[in-house]
Image: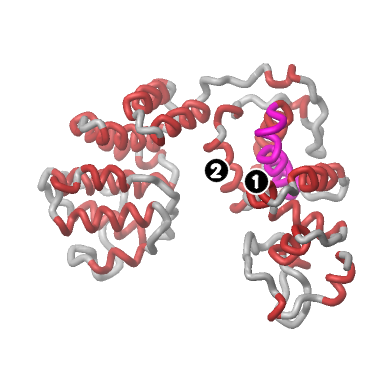
């Protein structure tokens, strides 16, 4: 059965694979009610992984949803096939820019282990395209690119030579000379190195890197949060408190997802030192009721380290907060605590209230 047969026969509800991936808006033809018979991106991916032939239209869909599913594809031995498909989609003149960007991200993820040079070229290409077309970037593509860039900062550079990329988003130069502008000491690379050290319990090494990033003035609010985390794990509470305070002073320059990290640190120190913490709880409550942006951050290890120094209820609250940031719990978990405000309102982040 080929892709045209699938499109014509459709998928019955009971035949749908028990897997769901990026079923988000990728094109008007993708979404259907249960009776129309048009396959979803997850169904197309499942069909392709099982060896089915797909149409050109389906190839475009697959290129869009495959980003972030590369490990699955590689585990099934489909690396060369998806690489060829992505290159084919990129080469098509009618491929839209978002699909082209997603395809390059996929090529980077596939190539980094087997062809580092091509991986770096793909990485630089995405960087150039996201700068050129940032106003057209959708949220999901931007988040995926941010995650890839964060995890693999050693390939990142702020300088993407325009001559390497055509107006249509196709690679022009392929030689190694295009990587001359890559800077191994840029902020993203350093942050990746610091995370590696944090993950291997080398907290002192991570701290040294974060201090270098602060000297570079790289994403200061978030970097101060990362620094406070490793300082706490080294039991440098005074330095960690100073880092948290400096992060708070820069709250208006912080990405929205960094704000709850700052608030967690402020609440943590207030509870640790027996200070009034309601003002920070109110601010967190206000944030949570204003379209919060919660990105994963591993802070549980810190809370556990200080368990014996915290009141039981405070420890439970901080662990609940940490679970929210780890995407394990929904924000409504806070409602079980007596000191959590019962009504919407409270202070805004902008009010400086002396403690």
Q: Earlier in the sequence, mark 1 or mark 2?
A: 1
Q: CA distance from mark 1 to mark 2?
A: 19 Å
The chosen color scheme is secondary structure
- Assign a secondary structure to mark 2: helix
Residue at position x 29%, y 48% from top? 264
Closer-to-camera residue (127/250): 127
| Horizontal arrangement in the rendering, residue 122 relative to residue 228 (left or right) | right
| Coordinates of residue 271 in the picture (x, y in percent) | 16, 49
- Magenta residues? 99-116
Residue 214 visible in rendering? yes
Q: Does residue 284 appear to the left or right of 171 in the view shown?
A: left
**CB of mark 1 within 8 Å of CB of mark 2?**
no
Checking the image for residue 135, the label placed there is: 1
- The local crowd at label 2, few if under 14, some if 14 to 19, many if 20 or more residues have their Cα within 10 Å, is few
Please provide percent x and percent y for residue 291. 43, 60
Closest to the camera, between mark 1 and mark 2, is: 2
- Is residue 137 in sight in this rendering? no
Task: Check disc 1 and report its element: helix, strand or loop.
Answer: helix
User: What's the mark number on residue 147?
Assistant: 2
Q: Judge by depth and name the residue closer to the eye, 97 or 24.
A: 24
Report x, y in % for residue 207: 34, 26
């Amino acid at each position: 059965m080929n892709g045209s047969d699938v499109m014509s026969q459709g998928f019955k509800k009971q035949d749908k694979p028990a897997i769901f991936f990026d079923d988000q808006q990728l094109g008007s033809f993708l979404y259907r009610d249960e009776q129309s018979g048009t396959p979803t991106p997850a169904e197309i991916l499942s069909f392709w992984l099982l060896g089915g032939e797909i149409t050109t239209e389906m190839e475009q869909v697959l290129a869009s949803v495959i980003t972030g599913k590369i490990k699955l594809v590689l585990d099934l031995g489909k690396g060369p096939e998806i690489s060829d498909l992505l290159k084919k989609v990129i080469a098509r003149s009618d491929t839209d820019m978002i699909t082209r960007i997603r395809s390059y991200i996929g090529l980077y993820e596939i190539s980094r282990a087997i062809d580092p040079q091509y991986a770096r070229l793909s990485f630089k290409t995405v960087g150039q395209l996201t700068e050129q077309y940032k106003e057209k970037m959708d949220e999901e593509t931007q988040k995926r690119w941010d995650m890839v860039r964060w995890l693999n900062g050693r390939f990142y550079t702020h300088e993407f030579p325009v001559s390497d990329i055509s107006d249509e988003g196709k690679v022009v130069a392929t030689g190694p000379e295009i990587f001359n502008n890559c800077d191994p000491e840029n902020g993203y690379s350093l942050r990746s190195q610091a995370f590696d050290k944090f993950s291997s319990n080398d907290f002192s090494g991570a701290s040294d890197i974060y201090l270098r990033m602060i000297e570079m003035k790289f994403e200061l609010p978030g970097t101060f949060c990362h620094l406070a985390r490793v300082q706490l794990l080294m039991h440098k509470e005074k330095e960690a408190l100073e880092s948290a305070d400096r992060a708070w002073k820069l709250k208006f320059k912080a990405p929205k997802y960094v704000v709850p990290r700052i608030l967690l640190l402020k609440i943590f120190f207030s509870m640790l030192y027996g200070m009034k913490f309601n003002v920070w709880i109110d601010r967190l409550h206000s944030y949570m009721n204003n379209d919060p942006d919660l990105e994963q951050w591993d802070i549980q290890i810190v809370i556990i380290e200080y368990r014996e120094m915290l009141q039981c209820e405070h420890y439970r609250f901080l662990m609940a907060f940490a679970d929210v940031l780890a995407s394990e719990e929904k924000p409504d978990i806070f409602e079980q605590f007596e000191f959590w405000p019962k009504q919407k309102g409270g202070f805004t982040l902008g009010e400086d209230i002396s403690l």
